[in-house]
Amino acid sequence: MSVINQVIEKVKRVDPGQKEFHQAVTEVLETLEPTVKRHPEFVKAGIYERIIEPDRTLMFRVPWVDDKGNVQVNRGFRIQFNNAIGPYKGGLRFHPSVNLSIIKFLGFEQIFKNSLTTLPMGGAKGGADFDPKGKSDGEVMRFCQSFMRELFRHIGAEVDVPAGDIGVGGREIGYLFGYYKKIRNEHTGVLTGKGLEYGGSLIRPEATGYGAVYFAAEMLATRGLDFNNKIVAVSGAGNVAQYAIEKANQMGGKVITVCDSSATIIDDKGIDPDKCCYVMDLKNVKRGRISEYAEKYKASCYDGKNVWDVIREQGIKVDIALPCATQNEIDGANAQALVNNGCICVAEGANMPSTPEAVKIFQDNKILFGPGKAANAGGVSTSGLEMSQNSMKLSWTREEVDKRLLLIMKSIHKSCMDAAEAYGRKDDYVTGANIAGFIKVAKAMLAYGIV
């Protein structure tokens, strides 16, 4: 049995039931097989065994009081996975589905994503099984303050810098940062995604969505194609999806889908800039349901279904797919439907939104496929740029940050292509992203000795 298979089997044995973590580890390590023979020093130093073990796993109780005076209790997490190339960096997710397996898979993926950005950031992730939906601002504030009462002792501008993720937007970051600032009596760049008024960066809200589109554009360019007049399917209705729609529109694409956890919208006329602004107001300000879009614009609404199920069932033509919702949203049947319906490019705006079966179908059919750790790295890249601005006590213009983001996404694309070719898997973005991200971290771990 190869070293890689031994490590995968060990993970499944010592971490039973953590299916998302198993999936992420298997997907990454299987593509690292070509590195084993070329780098025997990694095997000797146990790099493959060490990189799948978090530096530390934090789990803690989060008690808070709701508006009725009742005490509620949630579970909080922070997985500080690997800081070989810089301070721990990764978002916080507040969602009922959050558990140890999901946070570990996200933290593990973050190691390689952050490595690809060229910025000095290690991998981490955190969150809680708290659902901000339907909660008042006061309830969300009290939860965030209780969460930070434990988290503050484990983070810092040069130690671990959390950010937002699903369920953690500008409101939540504000409450978290405000409480950290109060109890530590310091104003540092300990969180990213902050408001512009207190140390945030321009383009940060847009960065993940913009970056996914920039990466897709780079992939398309390898075949002499672009977004112009292409039909684009986007899943989700949160931060990533909103700005993926905005940037796809700017590049000449026609976006026809948007969804949230309750329904999918199909708008054959296209979600133009005005409609995109409506979605942003609906979700960010009014915190409404996406079905209200259908009522306003007379679009088709499919309750209880995700975008990819609707595309499969309705046989809708799609040129470019941008999954921006959550993990494993595209299964094998959905992937085959996209292929059958003319899809030429998939760029993952979410983390691991395609199942292993779906990825294989995309690759077997020569679909341009950008995995999340590469395609959605724009968010953490701009978080890194926010950290840089905080360290230097200055702010860059919108144009400057956007320019740097575009250059980083181009660099990530080139790194993926170069690594894939160097290790005998030309044009395989999955292998290229994993190897390019891994090699940098592995060399740093090797330099430190056995620590």
Image (spheres, helix red, strand yellow):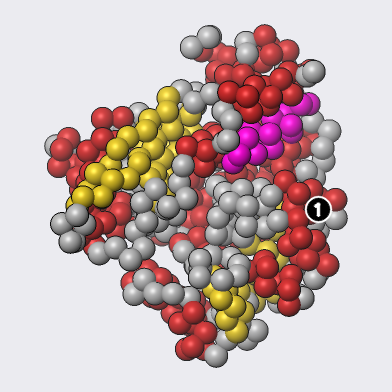
* Residue drawn at (65%, 84%) of the image: 268
Instruction: Pick the residue in front: 35 or 150.
Output: 150
- Residue 68 as seen in the image, left or right of residue 435: left
Quadrant, the N terminus: top right
* Residue drawn at (79%, 30%) of the image: 423
* Label 1 CA crowd tier, 10 Å (few <14, some 14–19, many 20+): many
Q: Position of residue 269 (x, y in %)?
A: 63, 86
Q: Position of residue 240 (x, y in %)?
A: 50, 60
Residue 31 magenta-drawn?
A: yes
Residue 384 visible in the picture: no
Instruction: Pick the residue in front: 381 or 283.
Output: 283
* Residue drawn at (54%, 73%) of the image: 263
Range shown magenta: 19-34
Q: Position of residue 77 (x, y in %)?
A: 39, 37
Residue 55 visible in the picture: yes
- Residue 437 as seen in the image, left or right of residue 398: right
Residue 99 magenta-drawn?
A: no
Instruction: Pick the residue in front: 166 or 224.
Output: 166
Where 3 sits versus 85, above or below?
above
**Looking at the magenta stretch, what is its main secondary structure?**
helix
Q: Amino acid at mark 1?
A: Ile
Residue topped by disc 1: 361
**SS of the residue at dot 1?**
helix
| Farthest front residue in view | 70
Where 273 sits versus 341, above or below?
below
Where 159 sits versus 404, above or below?
above
Count of numbered marks: 1
Instruction: Pick the residue in front: 176 or 270.
Output: 176
The quadrant holding residue 14 is: top right
